[in-house]
Image: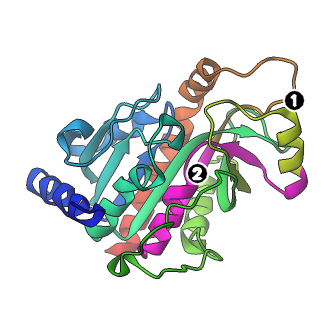
Amino acid sequence: MDQKDKVLEAVSLIHERIKHQPRVAVVLGSGLGAFADSVQEAIEIPYREIPGWPASTAPGHAGKLVSGLFGNTPVLVMQGRLHYYEGYSLSEVVFPVRVFGEMGIPFYFATNASGGISHSLAPGDLVLIYDHINFQGHNPLRGPNEGSWGPRFPDMTFAYDRELMDLTEVSASSLNMQIRRGVYAAFTGPSFETPAEIRMLRLMGADVVGMSTVPEVITARQMGMRVCAISCVANYAAGMYEKPLSHVEVLQEMEKASGKLVNLLQSVILKLGEKMQ
């Protein structure tokens, strides 16, 4: 069975289980699973029950799909994502995105926890990603191209949708919340970056660094989905302070900051739902 057959099998099971055709897919990063609690008429599907869907093994990732309504907008929420460092191939990492694309979901919202590279950022700050640097060494589109999924050489100039970015900034303003635009750099992990790597990224113009999101965005854009990505700074990047980095600290900081990001995400999706009516 090739990847498309596996994707279609997963799509079939999900459609059998859910009540509403999703309009928005949301991927929740480390420690950000609380958004799923606000979904109405929620139906939960553990990843292990979906054919071909890899298990989420990272701490702070529950590993289940939540389908339902947010306001009047049908959503499909990934409570926990997949990472390259978990040992999966990139085609496995982006398998959920392929499923969302085949389901015809037009909007893809990604959230993540990141390390702050810019000296103007502090733990708890929100960053609206407007561009990225792929330091993972691979591209999820490598290999045979499935023509029905999109072009062989998709353009990444506008990988992050400008209208959704504007909508997010309007939502942040209405909540008296600060958010700034920034460039996200993706490394493979699972080790944190070195101080020298952080200095290099700063010179390159990156603002935050993490271990996810970029393969998903590339795949979503190839499939024609409109992408919005919001990063929550969980810690200062390596070398900015003497304190060693730890994932426990990341999860602790995300627990403190998650309410802010959840409120923003809720506001953006409500406004998007109003525009779609």
Residue 97 in picture, x, y percent from top left: 38, 59
Q: In percent of the image, x 47 and y 74: which residue is there?
A: 222
* Quadrant that contains the N terminus: bottom left
Residue 15, magenta (yes or no):
no
Residue 16 sits in quarter: bottom left
- Measured along the vertical axis of the image, is residue 60 above or below residue 218? above
Q: In percent of the image, x 62 and y 43: which residue is there?
A: 188
Label 1 sits on what residue type?
Answer: Gly
Earlier along the polypeptide chain: callout 1 or callout 2? 2
Query: Helix, strand, or loop for circle 2?
Result: strand
Residue nearer the viewer, 185 or 24: 185
Label 2 sits on what residue type?
Answer: Ile
What residue is disc 1 on?
A: 239
* Residue 230: assigned label: 2
Residue 228, magenta (yes or no):
yes
The answer to whether one can see residue 119 in this image is no
Name the side, left or right, on which 45 lies relative to 216.
Answer: left
Name the side, left or right, on which 59 lies relative to 22.
Answer: right
Residue 228 in picture, x, y percent from top left: 53, 61
Q: In percent of the image, x 16 and y 58: which residue is there?
A: 9
The answer to whether one can see residue 96 in this image is yes
Quick one: label 2, few (<14), some, or many (20+) residues within 10 Å? many
Residue nearer the viewer, 91 or 243: 91
Give the farthest residue toward the left: 16
* Quadrant that contains the C terminus: bottom left
The magenta stretch is 203-231
